[in-house]
Image (tube, rainbow, N blue to C red):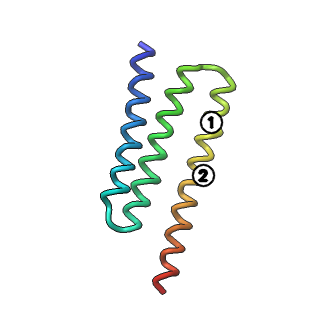
Amino acid sequence: MIDIVLLTLIFLGSAFILVAAIGLIRFNDLYSRMHATTKATSFGLLLLIIGVSLFFNTGTVWLKAFMVVVFIYLTAPLAAHSVAKSDKTKKL
């Protein structure tokens, strides 16, 4: 049963990252590309990290996974905001 859950989490995480990569290629403007890369990639990484943590299931892996998730969810919106602000200053 746990194998099915692990496989589902890792497959869905990979699928979200693939969708983000396709969105990065297909979208035309900067803001759409930022949305695709920050939202879908963050959720895909969350699913992948949960799947890997369930596979290894040790305290140190869970702690490291938690720290990675917190780092990703803190830095992805900040990076997108910085890119958006730098794009607005070029237009003025």
Query: Residue at point 35% right, 46% down?
Result: 19
Residue 8, position as x, y percentages in the image = 38, 26
Mark-to-mark CA distance, 2 and 1: 12 Å
**Circle number at residue 74:** 2
Farthest residue, direction top: 1
Query: Residue at point 51% right, 62% down?
Result: 80
The mark that comes first in sequence, 2 or 1, is 1
Q: Is residue 85 left or right of residue 34?
A: right
Picture layout, residue 76 above or below residue 18: below
Residue 60, position as x, y percentages in the image = 69, 26
Give the residue type at disc 2.
Answer: Leu
Q: Is residue 67 left or right of residue 30?
A: right
Asked which secondary structure carries label 1, the reply is helix
Query: Residue at point 45% right, 22% down?
Result: 6
Q: Is residue 23 left or right of residue 6?
A: left
What is the quadrant of residue 65 in the picture? Answer: top right
In front: 89, or 2?
89
Q: Residues within 10 Å of mark 1 (few under 14, many from 20)?
A: some
Q: Residues within 10 Å of mark 2 (few under 14, many from 20)?
A: few
Picture layout, residue 38 above or below residue 92: above
In front: 68, or 18?
18
Q: Which residue is mark 1?
A: 66
Number of dots carrying numbers: 2
Q: Which quarter shows the N terminus?
A: top left
Give the residue type at disc 1.
Answer: Phe
Farthest residue, direction front: 25
